[in-house]
């Protein structure tokens, strides 16, 4: 156990080769709060002996317990009648969602309060049987380290009625170890509810039939055997079950979609743009194509056509498919599948802009001067015909590597594509000039084969990706601007100012990394310059990730406050209605505006502001749920990929430093892991929180944020989705604290 000493310098604290326990410091006695909680929880009056047994106090503590009881009586929190006590405390009761840590204690996220504020801390002994995600009522007992501390008095709603886990057979039946570290218990499976012994060690889905008590474990019933937990497809299924997402659509939704009539003619009210050489540009494995572009140029500048699949023509407000799409909110992309927002007949056929097929679209027609400044805009329901389905790889070779073979093959479309290259370069320059941020934090791609993870590598983000991105950004901004000017209720994609405290953390870390930061006030231009200075340096990966952490989460809301990251005054999502419900709302609202401008009555039912606020919250939560699921799946794939590689060494970057150890990002793959401080057994280490480093007290060895290291894989925790490393060929900086 490491001994605690007074830090020698501000920002330094001593840690050693094992993790030290942090206990909240209380303004009042911890025993007072425990006694008050126990009396409040008890069904009737209790004696001092009862309390001693309930709290597990040693016999020698009688005098201390008596003093605590006297003090609580004096404060008017307890009443004594004879030798028994009962509670008089008029404790504040709050409701909220329980967030339990892997260590067993939790926090109640109080309903209606600012999520950036202090939640209510609940010790392990005061959980009252609540588990992670439950909606609970909590009584506030007092304060501890500036945070309210409470006691769960009622469980209002259970978050889990079923869960995933690993089944372990026993003589009397079995048990299930939950696939979630925040559920720190096992489910007992009785003999009659136990599956065959051959299921021992397999992943299962279990229904909770009894949540248990302080004396009895929860009980469950196996309802499905999933299979081998070392199979990647089984792990993805477990992640989907844990997230509560649906892969299939109901019979009613599918029947409704099957009844839809395909638009084959350029009907009245549509502009015929089939003469334009539209093309789609997507990834090699894309199956739905919801956006197409076309560019023309003349002496006055450029005209950009961004044509988006007209999903709103097929998906009407209030229909079964519309209600299902709203509940899903977004499509979710996993390594071997897509969990679509819309059924396949819509996403992959009726609303997919396939080459050489007439398709209804909604087109933004934007005009730009020779410098790339927008000088005109209009919007139209249209009929288009895509000339070609390009991949990002082909466009990269054709436009940016200028391969002669590719040029000859696509000679008919090459002039238009070159004009698109010219325009998007100008659009990017205009964006960067106003302070739009260009983060370079590529995502990882997972390659699977027959349930095995073959590889995990950084996804390439090419200039072809950015060409399409700049076109879509231009369309989204133009639609947001016209709807804002017309004061039409819609969901904007807003991105607020960064958290000042997190920006301060970034500036401190940047100095520790040796980056020379720009002068002046911190705004989007300052951040853009900081990113530019980090580019092509060893600190680039860490700097990008630290700045991303400082950013607020973008979200959907009816009040336009602009988009900080893009440096845009107006922004919403318009270009992907196949996979994002907010885009579908934007299509409907824009259609209503167009009809009004033509003197016609809008046929679409437009949402009011109150329902939009609710919709913005729901759809932002759907997006967050999708991101969390995608990250969970990536963590599972990383653990499976590394499962048989214990003992191997890897190049890595120190991506984080804390008093508990080091955090690593493996080179090439982006796989994350940690080096717990207890693995650093050669020295006592001082944690320099201001300069993000650990310093050896005797050796002066420094483990610094951004260092390149060689790490050896020591442990793989499948249930916890964690990788534990030790450091091997360290090339740390040396210096004095």
Image (cartoon, rainbow, N blue to C red):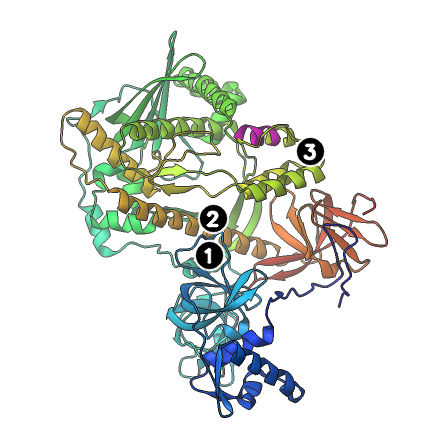
> As displayed, is residue 540 above or below residue 373?
below
Instruction: Kindly indicate whether the residue at mark 2 contacts the one at mark 3 (C-beta within 8 angstroms).
Output: no
The magenta stretch spans which residues? 524-530
Instruction: Kindly indicate whether the residue at mark 1 contacts the one at mark 2 (C-beta within 8 angstroms).
Output: yes
- Identify the element where label 3 is drawn: loop
Furthest residue toward bottom: 82
> As displayed, is residue 576 above or below residue 596?
below
Left-right relation of 649 to 90: right
Indicate which disc, 2 or 1, sits on the residue closer to the N terminus.
Answer: 1
Q: Which residue is mark 3?
A: 515
Residue 236 tag number: 1
Q: Which residue is mark 2?
A: 335
> Does the magenta segment cover residue 529?
yes
Residue at figure coordinates x 83%, y 46% from the top left: 736
Residue at figure coordinates x 44%, y 21% from the top left: 409
Residue 566 tag number: none
Indicate which disc, 3 or 2, sits on the residue closer to the N terminus.
Answer: 2
């Amino acid at each position: 156990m490491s001994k605690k000493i007074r830090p020698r310098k501000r920002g330094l604290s001593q840690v050693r080769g094992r993790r030290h326990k942090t206990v909240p410091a209380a303004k009042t006695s911890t025993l007072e709060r425990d006694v008050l909680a126990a009396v409040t929880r008890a069904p009737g009056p209790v004696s001092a002996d009862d309390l001693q047994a309930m709290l597990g106090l040693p016999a020698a503590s009688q005098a201390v317990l008596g003093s605590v009881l006297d003090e609580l009586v004096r404060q008017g929190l307890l009443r004594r009648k004879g030798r028994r006590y009962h509670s008089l405390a008029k404790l504040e009761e709050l409701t909220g969602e329980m967030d339990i840590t892997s260590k067993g204690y939790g926090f109640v996220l109080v309903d209606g309060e600012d999520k950036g504020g202090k939640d209510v801390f609940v010790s392990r002994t005061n959980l009252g049987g609540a588990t992670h995600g439950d909606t609970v009522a909590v009584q506030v007992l007092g304060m501890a380290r500036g945070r309210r501390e409470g006691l769960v008095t009622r469980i209002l709603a259970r978050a889990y009625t079923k869960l995933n886990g690993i089944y372990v057979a026993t003589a009397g039946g079995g048990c299930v170890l939950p696939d979630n570290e925040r559920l720190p218990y096992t489910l007992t499976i009785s003999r009659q509810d136990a599956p065959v012994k051959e299921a021992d060690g397999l992943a299962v889905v279990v229904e909770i039939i009894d949540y248990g008590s302080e004396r009895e474990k929860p009980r469950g019933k196996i309802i499905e055997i999933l299979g081998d937990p070392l199979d990647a497809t089984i792990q993805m299924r477990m992640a989907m079950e844990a997230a509560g997402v649906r892969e299939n659509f109901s019979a009613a939704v599918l029947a409704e979609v099957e009844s839809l009539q395909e638009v084959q003619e350029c009907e009245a009210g549509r502009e015929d743009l089939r003469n334009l050489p539209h093309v789609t540009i997507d990834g090699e494995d894309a199956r739905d194509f919801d956006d197409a572009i076309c560019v023309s140029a003349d002496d006055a500048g450029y005209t950009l056509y961004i044509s988006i699949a007209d999903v709103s023509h097929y998906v009407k407000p209030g229909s079964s498919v519309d209600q299902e799409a709203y509940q899903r909110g977004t499509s979710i992309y996993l390594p071997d599948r897509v969990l679509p927002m819309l059924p396949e007949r819509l996403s992959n056929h009726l609303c997919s802009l396939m080459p050489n097929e007439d398709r209804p679209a909604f087109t933004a027609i934007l005009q730009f001067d020779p410098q790339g400044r927008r000088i005109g805009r209009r919007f139209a329901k249209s009929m288009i015909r895509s000339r070609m389905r390009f991949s990002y790889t082909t466009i990269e070779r054709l436009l940016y590597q200028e391969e002669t073979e590719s040029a000859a093959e696509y000679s008919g479309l090459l002039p238009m594509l070159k004009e698109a290259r010219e325009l998007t370069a100008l659009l990017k320059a205009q964006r960067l000039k106003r302070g739009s941020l260009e983060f370079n934090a590529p995502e990882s791609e997972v390659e699977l084969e027959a349930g095995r993870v073959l590889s995990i590598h950084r996804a390439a983000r090419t200039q072809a990706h950015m060409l399409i991105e700049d076109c879509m950004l231009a369309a989204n901004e133009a639609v947001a601007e016209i709807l804002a000017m017309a004061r039409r209720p819609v969901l904007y994609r807003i991105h607020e100012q960064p958290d000042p405290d997190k920006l301060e953390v970034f500036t401190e870390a940047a100095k520790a990394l040796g980056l020379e930061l720009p002068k002046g006030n911190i705004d989007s231009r300052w951040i853009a310059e900081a990113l530019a200075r980090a580019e092509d340096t060893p600190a680039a990966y860490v700097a990008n990730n630290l700045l991303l952490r400082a950013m607020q989460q973008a979200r959907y809301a009816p009040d336009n406050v602009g988009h900080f990251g893009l440096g845009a005054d107006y922004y919403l999502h318009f270009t992907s209605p196949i996979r994002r419900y907010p885009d579908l709302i934007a299509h409907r609202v824009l259609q209503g505006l167009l009809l009004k401008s033509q003197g016609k009555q809008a046929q679409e039912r437009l949402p009011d502001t109150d329902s939009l606020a609710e919709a913005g919250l729901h759809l932002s939560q759907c997006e967050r749920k999708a991101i969390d699921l995608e990250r969970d799946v990536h963590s599972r794939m990383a653990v499976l990929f590394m499962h048989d590689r214990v003992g191997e060494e890897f190049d890595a970057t120190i991506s984080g430093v804390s008093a508990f150890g080091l955090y690593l990002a493996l080179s090439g793959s982006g796989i994350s892991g940690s080096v717990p401080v207890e693995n650093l057994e050669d020295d006592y280490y001082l944690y320099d929180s201001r300069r993000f480093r650990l310093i050896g007290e005797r050796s002066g060895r420094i483990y610094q944020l951004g260092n390149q290291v060689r790490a050896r894989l020591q442990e793989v925790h499948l249930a916890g989705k964690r990788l534990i490393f030790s450091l091997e060929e360290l090339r740390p900086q040396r210096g004095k604290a």
